[in-house]
């Protein structure tokens, strides 16, 4: 049963600044995320996308944003409603959910840093995250969102393919449009996507056929080194993390610290509401107590 305290009166144990800070923050997040969720759901329905396997869901940015927005809407609802109405159960659920996500984030950060800085762990545990990324290669051209996601990722990282190898560009042999087999008679045979290419100058226009015949060349080929990125995206990502440890540490701290603060604030407000309920109960019991007879 939800317990609710009537705060706001003089002498209340509930801090109004804390109460309304949690209310307005979570109410704003709830409204924004509900709008984003509705927009993403409309885009998915408009495109008529059929998400029948988990890989398609992972490679669908619209679907991921929709899910994240939906979860954030529900969580923030418990936050603003619990704070406004001083409902202990809602605040408790809010705190538990945020704590759960905090554990996931911390565990994920530790896992990523171990994989990056202790490469032998992958061999010992037989866990290769790049294999999951490489599964996206055959899906390229199957869906526009997937294609844009891969192209954007390769251009952002400066890589080609998804492996942790210096020859990641060869991953594109797994795609029916780009592979270098004798059965592939298409115009893109033995090529890589344009997003693997290096722009000659900062303001130049990228040639969409720049990756042609690159799968026929070795990593040390001068033309290949000048034209495309050879390393895989997992390799590129780990290289960037190794070179920017402080930056990534700051980003992770920026994600983790607000969650810790929200957990602490909700716990504090919950404690104050409990104190207020105890005071109210004592006040009611005192008023109901029979008056002592005068001697």
Image (tube, rainbow, N blue to C red):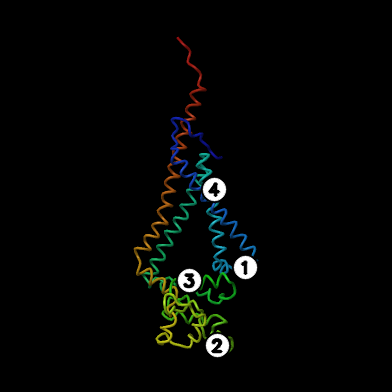
**Callout 4 crowding tier (Cα within 10 Å): few <14, some 14–19, many ≥20:** many
How far apart are labels 2 and 3 at the CA level? 26 Å
Mark 4 touches mark 2? (CB < 8 Å): no
Element assignment for label 4 = helix
Element assignment for label 1 = loop
Residue topped by disc 4? 77
Give whichever of 220, 78 is nearer the camera. Answer: 220
Residue at 58% x, 71% y: name it. Answer: 144
How far apart are labels 4 and 2 at the CA level? 54 Å
The tag earlier along the polypeptide, 4 or 2, is: 4
Q: Residue 181 carries which label?
A: 2
**Callout 2 crowding tier (Cα within 10 Å): few <14, some 14–19, many ≥20:** few
Q: Position of residue 217 (x, y in %)?
A: 45, 88
Residue 65 position (above or below residue 188): above
Quarter of the image for residue 218 reads bottom left
How far apart are labels 4 and 1 at the CA level? 30 Å
Residue at 52% x, 43% y: name it. Answer: 82
Residue topped by disc 1? 52
Mark 4 touches mark 3? (CB < 8 Å): no
Nearer mark to the viewer, of 4 and 1:
4
Residue 36 position (above or below residue 124): above
Quarter of the image for residue 189 reads bottom right
The tag earlier along the polypeptide, 4 or 1, is: 1
Nearer mark to the viewer, of 2 and 3:
3
Q: Where is residue 57 in the image (x, y as percent from the top left)?
A: 57, 66
């Amino acid at each position: 049963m939800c317990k609710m305290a009537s705060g706001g009166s003089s002498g209340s144990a509930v801090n109004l600044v804390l109460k309304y800070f949690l209310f307005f923050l979570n109410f704003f997040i709830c409204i924004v995320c509900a709008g984003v969720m509705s927009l993403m759901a409309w885009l998915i329905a408009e495109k008529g996308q059929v998400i029948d396997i988990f890989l398609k869901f992972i490679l669908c940015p619209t679907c991921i944003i929709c899910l994240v927005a939906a979860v954030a809407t529900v969580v923030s609802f418990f936050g603003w409603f619990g704070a406004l109405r001083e409902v202990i159960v809602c605040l408790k659920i809010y705190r538990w959910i945020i704590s759960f996500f905090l554990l996931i984030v911390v565990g994920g950060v530790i896992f990523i840093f171990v994989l990056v800085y202790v490469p032998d762990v992958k061999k010992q545990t037989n866990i290769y995250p790049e294999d999951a990324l490489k599964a996206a290669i055959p899906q390229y051209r199957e869906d526009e969102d997937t294609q844009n996601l891969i192209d954007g990722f390769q251009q952002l990282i400066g890589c080609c393919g998804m492996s942790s190898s210096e020859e990641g560009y060869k991953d594109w042999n797994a795609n029916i449009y780009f592979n270098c087999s004798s059965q592939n008679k298409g115009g893109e045979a033995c090529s890589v996507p344009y997003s693997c290419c290096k722009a000659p100058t900062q303001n130049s226009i990228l040639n969409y056929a720049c990756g042609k015949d690159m799968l026929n060349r070795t990593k040390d080929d001068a033309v290949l080194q000048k034209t495309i990125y050879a390393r895989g995206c997992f390799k590129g990502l780990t290289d960037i993390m190794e070179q920017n440890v402080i930056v990534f540490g700051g980003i992770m701290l920026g994600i983790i610290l607000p969650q810790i603060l929200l957990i602490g604030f909700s716990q504090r407000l919950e404690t104050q509401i409990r104190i207020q309920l105890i005071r109210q109960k004592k006040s009611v019991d005192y008023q109901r107590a029979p008056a002592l007879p005068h001697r």
